[in-house]
């Protein structure tokens, strides 16, 4: 049985990824410090280690554990925190990654699958949709940490032959997403629909984003775990956009949500766009998603609402 360590596996995306590995017959260990994740998101079929990715314990779990795959989802992922406290962002996202990679190479891990972000690594002025080789220019320390992580993976591939695949996600939505954060408009609207509260649209609601369902993201992780990895000619040859390639406006999203929920909910138009509320979600060309024929589907919103 192939053994995988999923960091951040008590969180939103990581827990779905861990579930997908279990369903595919992998032996799964989840490592998470529960800073935002929840213990109940971790399947009983997985082993659980509560630890910080930067700790000696996390490094030793990998160095001793006989893992074939490291799937790295744990992160400081708040763009605003990365701006106000860039050192904290780098400590968790960069020093944490390096700590894990040192454990991984000592423990003979073959492949690392890394959760990167299509919303923060590309040059914002570039033409949409972004292809993997599009110009990169992060505008936040969080974006720099995602891009730098991809470069560190390239270095470990070159130095130690550690295979790497980086998945650059669009806006991920689905069950277990935390609606209390500032991102994740689907989760925020979903929880308000549940509670019968009005939905607020900032600006004219015509801002578009690429929303991808979390179970499709989990499938992309399995594909990235199994597929042959190309030679590391640049970070882009082993990076894959994971999205739908479909632009959805906030207005469309509200319509879809209300249709799926089949209830009457007030919709409030607020003055002035809130870039933060809708942050981090440029349209990406879905390489893996194309291959898997993954398309946005309103039924998936229903699954999200039921959660
Ligand atoms: N949600 C999105 O739309 C999106 C988009 C692009 C990229 N990503 C990336 O996907 C990954 C997962 O995001 P998510 O939305 O599931 O967030 P999440 O907050 O639900 O999950 C992150 C998990 O990591 C854990 N964690 C945080 N810091 C840790 C540390 N120092 N040590 C150990 N565990 C730690 C948290 O407890 C949590 O369980 C992140 O790397 C994020 O940057 C997410």
Image (cartoon, grey):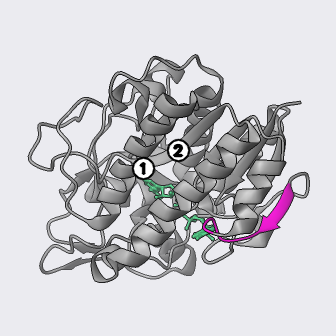
Asked if the residue at tag 1 contacts the one at tag 2, i.e. Cβ–Cβ closer than 8 Å, the answer is yes
Q: Is residue 256 left or right of residue 30?
A: left
Viewer-side residue, 294 vs 135: 135
> At x 37% / y 76%, what residue is drawn?
87
Residue 271 is marked as: none
Inspect the magenta stretch and tell me whether residue 209 lies in it: no
Viewer-side residue, 281 vs 71: 71
Which of the two labelled residues, at mark 2 and mark 1, occupies the earlier sequence position? 2
> At x 57% / y 27%, what residue is drawn?
161
* Residue 245 image offset from top left, x and y in percent: 33, 34
Residue 114 is marked as: 2
Q: Is residue 306 above or below residue 122?
A: below
> At x 86% / y 53%, what residue is drawn?
46
| Distance (Cα) linking label 2 and label 1 | 8 Å
* Residue 143 image offset from top left, x and y in percent: 31, 58
Residue position marked by numbered label 1 in the rendering:
149
Viewer-side residue, 191 vs 121: 121
* Residue 233 image offset from top left, x and y in percent: 35, 21
Between tags 2 and 1, which lies in front? 1
Task: Give the magenta part as a residue range.
Answer: 47-54
């Amino acid at each position: 049985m192939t053994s995988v360590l999923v960091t951040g596996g008590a969180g939103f995306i990581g827990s779905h990824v861990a579930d997908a590995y279990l369903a595919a017959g992998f032996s799964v260990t989840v490592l998470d410090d529960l800073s935002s994740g929840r213990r109940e998101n971790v399947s009983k079929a997985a082993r659980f280690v509560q630890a910080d990715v930067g700790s000696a314990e996390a490094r030793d779990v990998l160095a001793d554990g006989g893992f074939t795959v490291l799937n790295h989802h744990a992160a400081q992922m708040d763009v605003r925190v990365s701006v106000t406290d860039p050192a904290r962002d780098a400590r968790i996202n960069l020093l944490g990654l390096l700590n894990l990679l040192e454990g991984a190479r000592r423990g003979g891990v073959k492949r690392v699958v890394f959760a990167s972000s299509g919303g923060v690594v590309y040059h914002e002025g570039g033409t949409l949709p972004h292809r993997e080789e599009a110009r990169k220019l992060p505008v936040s320390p969080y974006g720099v940490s995602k891009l730098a992580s991809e470069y560190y993976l390239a270095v470990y591939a070159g130095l130690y032959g550690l295979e790497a695949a980086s998945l650059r996600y669009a806006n991920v939505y689905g069950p277990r997403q935390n609606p209390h954060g500032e991102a994740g408009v689907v989760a925020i609207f979903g929880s308000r629909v549940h509670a019968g509260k009005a939905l607020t649209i900032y600006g004219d609601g015509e801002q578009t984003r690429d929303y991808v369902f979390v179970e499709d993201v989990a499938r992309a992780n399995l594909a990235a775990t199994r597929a042959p990895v190309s030679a590391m000619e640049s970070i882009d040859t082993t990076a894959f956009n994971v999205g739908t390639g479909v632009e959805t406006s906030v207005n469309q999203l509200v319509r879809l949500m209300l249709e799926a929920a089949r209830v009457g909910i007030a919709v409030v138009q607020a003055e002035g766009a809130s870039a933060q509320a809708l942050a981090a979600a440029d349209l990406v060309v879905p390489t893996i998603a194309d291959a898997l024929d993954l398309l946005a589907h309103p039924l998936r919103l229903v699954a999200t609402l039921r959660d």
